[in-house]
Image: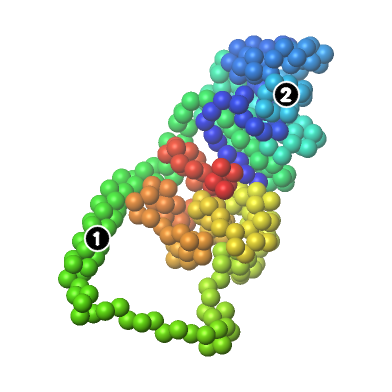
């Protein structure tokens, strides 16, 4: 199911539950902990006082009170001690135990901060790796949309090989493609303008169109010539790959309900990032991807950084939505699987 890295204020997210990076007392503190208590109001502290604290790596749940979220899940991350005090395992437990509580309370959307990466001193790159891997592993088996909320746009993935590959590709092609698109557009404009000016309308009056009655139309031929829509094309491609629907939408990090809507509604037009997500999940090549995009009314634009990133990844047979979303995050572009796309 979807996993999305976003920038913003976790206290303002309209999700079922937000996770609080608390201390062992659960009585409030600085950073995210203090911000959540302030936004929730004094009733949150009163309930926390009844919980008897929380052990590192464990999680407890309260109501959300004045927050948009229905629940607050409080978890205590480890203080960084150089990695010699079981910190990675404890940090992973924070995410796993919080997600288990969210499942128990039937939460479909959950937002995490980057636990332990502030005052507790956990190296941010390492904290991000643990968060991403732990969350992705859990949601493979659970219908849940999880957000990892970063306050301020920090770079986490620019040292990774895929980002470097994409960066080099964009530097090589983006300005070139953009210039070609502008020149092509200008050429078409001037050619059309010249054609209109040179056309002699007096000597070339408009032709009368042939009027057809409904009896003249060969409807069987029309239906047979009609291109398949996105929904049917996607289902045909899944069948051709010999995979289950669940593997397709999970690999695409697409919500199960959205997939069901696409499958049941032949007229549904998904967003462009969603179409690309399915192309990645199905391991399509560029030609097949272009064909799938066309059924939803899209094409690959050489002047779009989003499209160029996907072109680069597909051309290099990178078929991991999570890895590609990391690159899209760094470019501040829409991520595949995001509910905001639809």
Q: Residues within 10 Å of mark 2 (few under 14, many from 20)?
A: many
Residue farthest bottom in this picture: 216
| In this rendering, the label closer to the viewer, 1 or 2 | 1
List x then y, in percent, for residue 194: 18, 66
- Horizontally, residue 142 falls left or right of residue 237, namely right
Label of residue 189 in the image = 1
Residue 41 image-quadrant placement: top right
Classify 69 as above or below 293.
Answer: above
Q: Residues within 10 Å of mark 1 (few under 14, many from 20)?
A: few
> Which residue: 64% across, 37% down?
146
Label of residue 7 in the image = none
Query: How many circles with numbers are drawn on the protein?
Result: 2
Kindly state the secondary structure of the residue where label 2 is placed: loop
Figure coloring: rainbow
Residue that mark 2 sits on:
64
List x then y, in percent, for residue 73: 72, 25
Front residue of this view, candidates 26 and 273? 273
> Which residue: 34% across, 47% down?
170
């Amino acid at each position: 199911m979807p996993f999305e890295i976003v920038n913003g204020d976790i206290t303002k997210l309209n999700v079922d539950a937000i996770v609080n990076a608390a201390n062992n007392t659960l009585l409030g503190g600085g950073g995210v902990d203090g911000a959540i208590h302030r936004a929730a109001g004094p009733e949150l502290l009163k309930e926390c006082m009844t919980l008897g604290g929380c052990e590192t790596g464990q999680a407890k749940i309260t109501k959300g009170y004045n927050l948009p979220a229905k629940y607050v899940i409080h978890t205590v991350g480890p203080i960084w001690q150089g990695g010699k005090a079981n910190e990675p395992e404890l940090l992973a437990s924070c995410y796993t135990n919080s997600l288990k509580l969210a499942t128990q309370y039937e939460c479909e959307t959950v937002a995490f901060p980057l636990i332990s990466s502030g005052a507790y001193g956990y190296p941010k790159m390492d904290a991000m790796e643990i968060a991403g891997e732990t969350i992705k592993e859990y949601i493979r088996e659970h219908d849940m949309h999880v957000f990892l909320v970063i306050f301020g746009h920090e770079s986490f993935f620019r040292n990774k090989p895929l980002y470097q590959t994409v960066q080099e590709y964009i530097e090589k092609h983006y300005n070139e493609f953009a210039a070609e698109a502008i020149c092509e557009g200008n050429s078409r404009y001037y050619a059309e303008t010249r054609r209109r000016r040179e056309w002699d309308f007096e000597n070339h009056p408009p032709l009368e169109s042939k009027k057809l009655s409904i009896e003249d139309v060969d409807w069987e031929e029309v239906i047979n010539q009609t291109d398949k829509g996105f929904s049917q094309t996607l289902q045909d491609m899944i069948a051709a790959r010999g995979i289950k629907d669940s593997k397709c939408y999970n690999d695409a990090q697409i919500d199960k309900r959205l997939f069901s809507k696409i499958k049941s509604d032949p007229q549904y037009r998904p967003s462009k990032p969603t179409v690309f997500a399915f192309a990645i999940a199905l391991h399509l090549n560029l030609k097949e991807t272009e064909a799938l995009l066309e059924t939803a009314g899209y094409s690959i634009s050489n002047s779009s950084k989003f499209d160029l990133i996907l072109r680069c990844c597909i051309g290099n047979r990178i078929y991991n939505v999570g890895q590609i979303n990391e690159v899209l995050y760094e470019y501040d572009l829409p991520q595949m699987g995001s509910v905001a796309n639809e």
